[in-house]
Every structure is written in C-alpha cells, then in structure tokens.
Image (tube, rainbow, N blue to C red):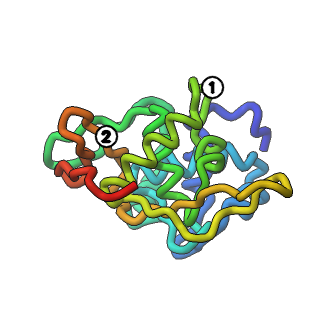
Amino acid sequence: MDAAKLEPGEIPTTILHHLCEGECQTIDQIVNALGLTHRQVSNGAGKLILRNYLERVEIGCYQLTRDGLTAKHNGTVITSGPWRPDTAGTRKPVRDTFRQRLWTAMRMSGAFTIGELVMAASRDDADPENHTGRYLRYLKAAGYVVELPVRAKGTHQTSNGFKRYRLLKNTGPTAPLYQAKRKSLHDYNSGVDVPCNKPL
C-alpha cells in the first residue's frame, strides 16, 4: 500500500475493513499490516473512535465495536469532513479542533505526558504545549484527569522527568469544553456542567 497516496478519509476506512470481529490489534500491528505510519494509524483510529467504531479494550490494543462491525459489514466509507454523532438530543458537532484531537488522544491512551499528547494532536497549532497544559488543568480540576505519582523518564540526566496523566472519565467522543464564566467543564457527551473545583 502506498501510504503517501492515501486520502485522509481512506486511512480510517482501511483500518476499519482491516480489523476482524473479536480481534484486538496494537498500533504497531496495524502499522506493520497496512504499511502506514504510526501517525496515520493514530489519526485514523481517532476518527473511528469518534464514530464509536473502535474502542480500546486494554492499553494499546484496539478492536471494533458493535457499531464498527456493522459499518464494516455494510461497506461504510469514512469521509474526511466534520462528523456529527447520531444522537437523539441536540449535541455540539464533533469538529477537528486541537482540543478535540487532544481528547481523542487521551481516550486512546493509557497514561500520557503533555509531550505525547502534543505529538499525537498537533498539526502546526500555535503554542500547543501551553494549550495542552491548560486543558489538562481544567480536566483535572473537574475530576476527568488524574496526575500519576510516577513521572516519565526525562531526556537529560538532570531532568526530574515529565508529569504523567490518566483519563478517569471517558464519557464519550466529544471533547468537554471549559466555560470560564461558570468555572465549569461542559460535557457534551453527558449534557452536564461539571464544576472545576478540585485541587490542581
């Protein structure tokens, strides 16, 4: 497969139709099987997760959901444009923003650092490290994210390492939004406002 010639929508479609019922594969296995890059597989898997077609069943291992199996059997083709979840109520459309990509990367990961999230989500975004750190603080204050006691190893001998986090509340595909006036996090998945009153 010539990965360079694939259109953005073709990558998640290729991953969708590659996975088999009940099969759990790691990112590395998908990369090796399809000849894609890690970034392409990560982005493609993120689009499938947004549509509830893919889920992480254990750290680093992904399999198709019931909706994903249905989409595969129906020959569904994933498009590269914005996508709105199919819900009974009114919900904010899922847009391809930096915050949305951060949230998707968190949902796909076990533990993560700010640098790892930036690597997965940034596409020439301005000041991605600061934006990522700020969003993590909001999620932590709302009880969605926890800072882990053991840091990731630093790149220099004198480094104290990097803070590691884990997502505690994976409520759905749409990234929660911080509301400064209310000092709360609006969760589009649950439809509730969560106060950001936990210690940072």
Query: In the picture shown, does residue 2 fall above or below 28?
Result: above
Question: Residue 69: in sight, yes or no?
Answer: no
Query: In the picture shown, does residue 95 fall above or below 63?
Result: above
Question: Residue 43: in sight, yes or no?
Answer: yes
Left or right position of 156 against 183:
right
Left or right position of 34 against 133:
right
- Return the residue nearer the eye: 78 or 81: 81
Residue 33 appears at what percent x and percent y? 76, 59
Crowdedness of circle 2 by 10 Å Cα count: few (<14), some, many (20+)?
some
Image disc number at residue 124: 1
What amino acid is found at the position of numbered circle 1 in the picture?
Asp
Label 1's element?
loop
Q: Quadrant of the C terminus?
A: bottom left
Residue 18 appears at what percent x and percent y? 62, 58
Residue 42 appears at what percent x and percent y? 62, 49
Residue at mark 2:
177
Image disc number at residue 94: none
Q: Going 57% across and 33% down the picture, which residue do you hit?
A: 128
